[in-house]
């Protein structure tokens, strides 16, 4: 796998700003499944929900591919890797997110 993934988020650790500073790291994708991307990007508690994204070139916009959610404890043993991971943004998940955006924070109850 010759693809880099980036994760940028706000760590909840005291030594990393208690969520007041954005931290980012990138590393190569080390495994994928139909629903997850596995990588050794350095993350810390508090970064769950951060975007996992790729950048095709120095001038290209980032492309969100997943949502960081798991540390190394969430990696199935049969993959044979130690990795953090993120659920992939599948077409179904993309549609769900778009529906949430369309409905808005009040669930469509407000006018």
Image (cartoon, helix red, strand yellow):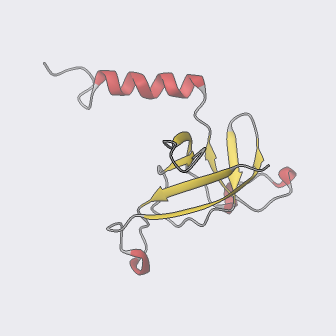
> Which image quarter: residue 41?
bottom right
The picture places residue 88, in percent across and down from the top left corner, at 62, 38
- Give the vertical position of 90 relative to 27 (above or below): above
- Give the vertical position of 8 relative to 103 (above or below): below
> Which image quarter: residue 99?
top left
Depth order, front residue of 32/53: 53
- Residue drawn at 35 percent across, 66 percent down: 19
Give the residue furthest to the front. 59
Depth order, front residue of 5/74: 5
Horizontal relation, residue 108 to residue 45: left or right:
left
Horizontal relation, residue 8 to residue 104: left or right:
right
The picture places residue 29, in percent across and down from the top left corner, at 72, 52
- Give the vertical position of 31 relative to 94 (above or below): below
Give the residue furthest to the left. 111
Give the residue furthest to the bottom. 15
The picture places residue 81, in percent across and down from the top left corner, at 81, 59
For the C terminus, give its image quadrant: top left
């Amino acid at each position: 796998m010759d693809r880099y993934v980036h994760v940028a988020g706000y760590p909840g650790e005291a030594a990393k700003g208690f969520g007041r500073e954005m931290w980012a790291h990138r590393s190569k994708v080390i495994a994928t499944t139909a629903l997850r991307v596995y990588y050794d990007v350095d993350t810390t508690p508090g970064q769950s929900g951060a975007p996992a994204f790729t950048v095709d070139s120095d001038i290209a916009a980032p492309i969100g591919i997943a949502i960081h959610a798991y540390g190394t404890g969430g990696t199935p043993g049969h993959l044979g890797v130690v990795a953090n991971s993120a659920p992939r943004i599948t077409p179904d998940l993309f549609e769900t997110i778009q529906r949430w955006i369309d409905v808005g924070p009040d669930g469509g109850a407000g006018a």
